[in-house]
């Protein structure tokens, strides 16, 4: 099992992925149910609804869960557990097209994962139970997600972000978590900035069967659940 497999196993044991996956899928489907273009809704409003719902409901979902801490950083939901930092980002295009330069927080995880030396604690409150324990060598985990505005079906990838400003893949390892990589639905826009300038920065996840993503696609890596559109943010 590789580093991504280790991370998934630990996060599954802590109940993080199961809770997060259910929440993301519920939020996507509710947003699609409420989406009414005839009343002025569009892709931007859909993405913003998903983003803000995940931030607020995610905080409530993980409040009081043993061994899990949740906070909002860079207007995005961040989940801290067993030394891992899990953040969610919207996808606009193929999973290999995602960019980390959108913000300091977004790029920081990829940069830290790309260092060879032992990682430092950037927040001593992250590990209240085992502060003296070993920090995972690549502790930043990213969920790249997208969904279908019409059906509410979501697609999500989970991976270890890599600093690729000099070229190469944005991932050390990445796998299709759930959903279909393609959809007939409308792609969501990339949204960045504070709340008035919407961004949908988080999404879904079920049970994982982990395998390394082959070059050129992510088919057949995980259970599929409906149609969706890939993209990068």
Image: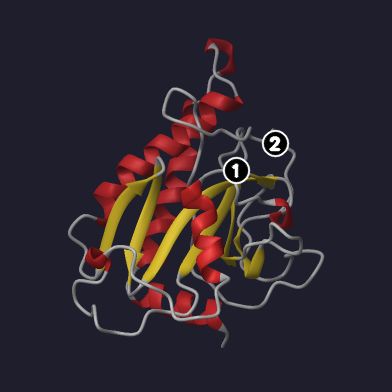
Q: How is the image coloured?
A: secondary structure
Q: Dot 2 corresponds to which residue?
A: 185
Mark 1 or mark 2, which is nearer the start of the sequence? 1
Q: CA distance from mark 2 to mark 1?
A: 8 Å
Instruction: Provide the secondary structure element on which disc 2 rests.
Output: loop
Q: Is residue 232 left or right of residue 40?
A: right
Give the answer, above or below, for where 36 lies relative to 108. Answer: above
List x then y, in percent, for residue 39.
52, 11
Q: Nearer the viewer, residue 154 or 116?
A: 116
Residue lying at 58% horizontally and 77% vertically, measured from the top left: 210
Q: Are dots 2 and 1 in contact, CB under 8 Å? A: yes
Q: Is residue 30 left or right of residue 192?
A: left
Q: Quadrant of the C terminus?
A: top right
Residue lying at 49% horizontally and 65% vertically, measured from the top left: 141
Q: Quadrant of the N terminus?
A: bottom right
Q: Would you identify the image quadrant in which residue 66 lies?
A: bottom left
Question: Residue at the bottom extreme?
Answer: 1
Give the answer, above or below, for where 194 lies relative to 27. Answer: above
List x then y, in percent, for residue 74.
41, 43
Q: Is residue 84 left or right of residue 130?
A: right
Kindly tell me whether residue 223 is visible in this rendering.
Answer: yes
Q: Dot 1 corresponds to which residue?
A: 147
Give the answer, above or below, for where 106 lies relative to 66. Answer: above
List x then y, in percent, for residue 172.
64, 72
Instruction: Provide the secondary structure element on which disc 1 rests.
Output: strand
List x then y, in percent, for residue 112.
50, 67
């Amino acid at each position: 099992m590789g580093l991504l497999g280790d991370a998934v196993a630990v996060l599954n044991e802590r109940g993080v992925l199961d809770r997060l996956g259910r929440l993301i899928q519920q939020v996507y489907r509710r947003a699609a149910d409420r989406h009414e273009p005839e009343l002025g809704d569009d892709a931007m409003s859909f993405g913003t609804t998903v983003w803000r719902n995940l931030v607020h409901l995610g905080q409530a979902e993980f409040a009081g869960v043993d061994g899990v801490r949740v906070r909002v950083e860079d207007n995005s939901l961040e989940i801290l557990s067993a030394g891992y930092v899990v953040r969610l980002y919207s996808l606009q295009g193929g999973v290999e097209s995602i960019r980390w330069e959108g913000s300091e927080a977004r790029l920081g995880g990829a940069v830290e994962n790309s260092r060879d030396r032992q990682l430092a604690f950037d927040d001593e409150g992250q590990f209240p139970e085992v502060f003296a324990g070993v920090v995972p060598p690549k502790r930043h985990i990213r969920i790249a997600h997208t969904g279908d505005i019409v059906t509410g079906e979501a697609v999500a990838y989970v991976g270890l972000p890599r600093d690729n400003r000099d070229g190469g893949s944005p991932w050390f390892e990445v796998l299709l978590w759930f959903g279909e990589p393609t959809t007939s639905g409308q792609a969501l826009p990339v949204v960045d900035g504070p709340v008035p300038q919407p961004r949908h920065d988080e999404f879904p996840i079920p049970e994982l069967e982990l395998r390394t993503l082959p070059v050129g696609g992510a088919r057949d890596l995980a259970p599929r659940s409906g149609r969706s559109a890939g993209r990068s943010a």
